[in-house]
Image: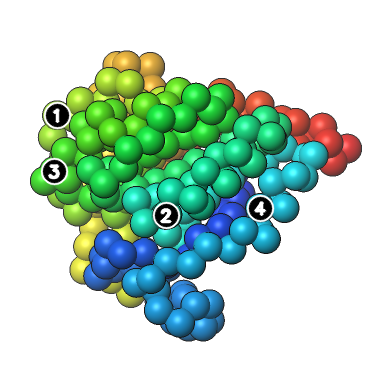
Amino acid sequence: MAVCIKDQIQNMNLVIGCTVGCPYCYARNNVKRWHMIDDFSHPEFFPEKMRMMDKPCPHNYLLTGMSDLAGWEMEWREQVFSKIRENPQHQFLFLSKRPDLLNISADLDNAWFGVTVTRRSELWRIDALRENVKAKHYHVTFEPLFDDPGVVDLSGMDWVVVGTMTGAQSKKVRTEPAWAYSLTEQAHALNIPVFWKEDLAPIMGEVSMIQELPQAFCEVLEAQRAWRK
């Protein structure tokens, strides 16, 4: 059975809201449904949530599940980066669709900076990530994958995630197996682990699912299991 990525990486929504405006945004729909903030297009910072970072039990955390790093104010980033440095037991992930707006230099051992790419015309985001974010770990998420990205320069990336459209629009959009296989072959040629999200299982087949995590994430999960014994 395919593993759910949310069981491996938990969301910590320190910032809610995004200025990108993707028409298929699940986060905007959830915010509207649960009335989390008044205006999703104006991100809000919830610094009190950072106390969760002090948990001694290791976790893998995604910090941009309901935001885009490019929409974070510099003051917010500095507070969060400082807290990350104080908690090396965790691994922290960031994602952005506007890496061209970023200017970050972070020497954090446990922070992973990535971009989301949904189609070939957005491959420039990977180049912009390498150019505008100086960090120790990079990743790229192809989700939802709308077309064949073709040949991709994955140099410097430490992890690749592939997923398809979910929800009501999943009947209209389908990620082709060949696209996922091509990305996986290109990543594996560079020894980059690849994780197919569980929503690809009906398309790729349960027995064919590839769900690899970076070693640092695996170590966190192993530590969690030991902690709970």
Q: Which residue is mark 2?
A: 72
- Asked whether the residues under the numbered discs 2 and 1 touch, taking CB atoms below 8 Å apart as contact, a structural biologist would say no
Q: Residue furthest front?
A: 75
What residue is at 14 percent from the left and 29 percent from the top? 151
Q: Is residue 83 above or below residue 131?
A: below
Q: Tell which circle, 4 or 2, labels the residue nearer the N-terminal end.
A: 4
Of the two numbered discs 2 and 1 in the rendering, the one whose residue sits closer to the viewer:
2
Q: Quadrant of residue 21?
A: bottom left
Could you tell me which secondary element the residue under label 4 belongs to?
helix
Q: Which residue is mark 3?
A: 120
Which label number is shown at residue 50?
4
Q: Tell which circle, 1 or 3, labels the residue nearer the N-terminal end.
A: 3
Q: Tell which circle, 3 or 2, labels the residue nearer the N-terminal end.
A: 2
Q: Quadrant of the C terminus?
A: top right
CA separation in Å, label 3 and label 2: 26 Å
Q: Is residue 212 visible?
A: no
What residue is at 34 percent from the left and 32 percent from the top? 133
What residue is at 36 percent from the left and 56 percent from the top? 71
Of the two numbered discs 4 and 1 in the rendering, the one whose residue sits closer to the viewer:
4
Q: Is residue 14 above or below residue 38?
A: above
